[in-house]
Image (cartoon, helix red, strand yellow):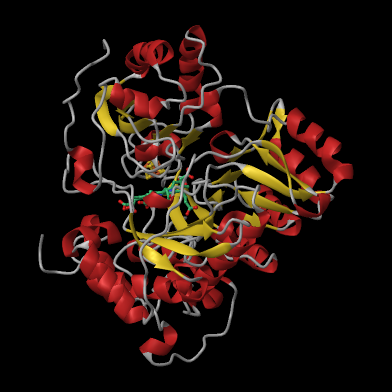
Amino acid sequence: MTDEVSRNERIKEASDYLRGTLAEGLREEITGAIVEDDQQLVKFHGMYLQDDRDLRSERSRKKMEKAFAFMIRVRIPGGVLSPAQWLALDQVARDYGNGGMRLTTRQTVQLHGIIKSNLKATLKRIDAALLNSIAACGDVNRNVMCGANPDQSQAYAAAIELARAVSDHLTPRTPAYREIWLDGERIAGGEDEVVEPIYGKTYLPRKFKIVVTVPPSNDVDVFAHDLGYIAILDDKGSVTGWNVTAGGGMGMTHGEPDTYPRTADVMGFCETKDAVAIAEAVVTVQRDWGNRLNRKHARLKYTIEDRGLDAFRAEVVRRAGVQLSPPQPFTFTSTGDRYGWSDGANGRSHLTLYVENGRLLDRAGAQQMSALRQIAQNHDGDFRITPNQNLIVANIPAERRTEIHWIAQEAGLLAPWSGLRRNSMACVALPTCGLALAESERYLPDLMTALDEKLAAHGLTAADIVIRMTGCPNGCARPYLAEIGLVGKGPGRYNLYLGAAYDGSRMNKLYAEDLEHGALVAALDPIFAAYAAERQKGERFGDFTIRAGFVAATGNGRDFHANVGNQTRRAAR
Ligand code: SRM
Ligand code: SF4
């Protein structure tokens, strides 16, 4: 490590609050790309420059520029959209994007395939729908997630209110977004602290992620995020306050044990009135204490590991000017979604749909974009994207239940029987993700078909087993919290992790490396057989793989890489 701040720090510092040369770059017609420094800055505006990796070699052979296009990630706190907003995004996706919408693991929508000359028009349409993409990416607080479980409407109302309050409070104040994308007038700059009172000129050392959840559902995977709020309920189901968690994160790099996924610590309990002040204090401590030299060591999880939780908590409490009392008891039961119909308030109902890997498209036999458009056109409730890449059509009046059920069924949006599929997630990976080492979204369905055959043979078709795949170790589908985690190592090859807790409280452990399709199925089949034959009543698959000695249990932080290969029992490979 050098003593020099990382290149991104210099780019931020020189950017004039995220302007850089983006406005000029947009006018440049010779290329579909933008210059390198602006590629970093545009993330703070919710966009990534990408290219279609399927076309790379052909275009290079023809000496053509890469097939550049942008991905836009919309900011949607708690994943809640009105029907009008849904329709606006659907229209934009078809007019300017690749025709589909990608529901993400953090409750947002990504639109892929938007060429540079259409960026402004796209963002103006998004703005007209009262949405934006400010800080959906970049070294700032990202989209704030909120548990989407529709069962507890009273507590959900408190949770979404907190998620929105935190999101609003931590949204960057720079007018750059309005100036560049919406043709806003340049507002005369003020003093630094007026422009960005919380972030300052160089924003945060790295991305920052916040979630709010209501037990017993841990659908947001609270322990995977920088900062989390767990609702504490009284016996009438009202929220009395929040346990605060800090220091979770999933990213790591293969072969670099100094990088590791980490589950968050529970720091203490706060009242609702203090929750936003705590968020600001956590963010500013990370702003000042976080590592700005090495981006691979810059997330809050490393700050807490380096400084210790006690010192971190003391500084947060000092800056917030409020107390954190000891954490209160809570119980999580799962990280999954509750599919199908559930009753809401005022005689209305919610329908949780299954969206395979979050990808919505009109395909032969499954016209999913069209189906959801049809539902939205007559809907006066709302849409909620779940943290598992699924979608809830919320607040449906009794008279529309049958029609909506039928439309969803026709489009293949009802949950399948397979317990594996119901509990699956895969990140985008190829062809758009520049960091992918292997396929993910395009491969997991085929792998699950092969695994489902094996599970059926062992009578486990309906067993709820959490499986997640990513195309690289960055962890975008939170694979280290899956009972079966699959992480891309190279083309067609994956590392296999086992032993996470079903409720999201414990990470998994590396079981086998570099497996291709056949080897993956062969590695898992005997473990399924053992699970079918030897599991105890109610025992989850992840817990079983530890008890049966296939992997050691993972504790926290650096322990993720410890005790790999110390298993007492290995399945034949
Ligand atoms: Fe992610 C980078 C996609 C959730 C950890 N992530 C990327 C990029 C932008 C690739 C890049 O930097 O060039 C991917 C764009 C792919 C594409 O073509 O669209 C990408 N991440 C996604 C999404 C779309 C996955 C999905 O299939 O749903 C998720 C969008 C979330 C959102 O709406 O905001 C997504 N990413 C996550 C999560 C899960 C979460 O937050 O709950 C994680 C792990 C949690 C965490 O942050 O620790 C995650 N993404 C990363 C990392 C590793 C960060 C680290 O600390 O090391 C990167 C790479 C980086 O930041 O350097 C990354
Ligand atoms: Fe890309 Fe890796 Fe994230 Fe998958 S996990 S979307 S391959 S960065």
Q: Quadrant of ligand 2?
A: top left
In screen coordinates, is 282 left or right of 450? Answer: left
Q: Nearer the viewer, residue 180 or 557?
A: 557
Q: Is residue 66 above or below residue 413?
A: below
In screen coordinates, is 186 left or right of 95? Answer: left
Q: Nearer the viewer, residue 167 or 245?
A: 245
Kindly tell me whether residue 290 is visible in this rendering: no
| Residue 468 image offset from top left, x and y in percent | 43, 33
Q: Nearer the viewer, residue 347 or 408?
A: 347
Q: Is residue 495 above or below residue 302?
A: above
In screen coordinates, is 26 left or right of 411? Answer: left
Q: Nearer the viewer, residue 143 or 345?
A: 345
Q: Determine the residue positioned at 19% across, 38% down.
A: 561
Image quadrant in which you'd find residue 518: top left
Q: Determine the residue positioned at 16% across, 32% down.
A: 563
* Residue lying at the far top of the rendered structure: 457
| Residue 256 image offset from top left, x and y in percent | 17, 43
* Residue lying at the far front of the rendered structure: 235
Q: How many marks?
A: 0
Kindly tell me whether residue 185 is visible in this rendering: yes
| Residue 251 image offset from top left, x and y in percent | 31, 48
Image quadrant in which you'd find residue 484: top left
Position of the N terminus by quadrant: bottom left
Q: Determine the residue positioned at 52% across, 88% down.
A: 187
* Residue lying at the far left of the rendered structure: 2
| Residue 183 image offset from top left, x and y in percent | 59, 77
Position of the C terminus by quadrant: top left
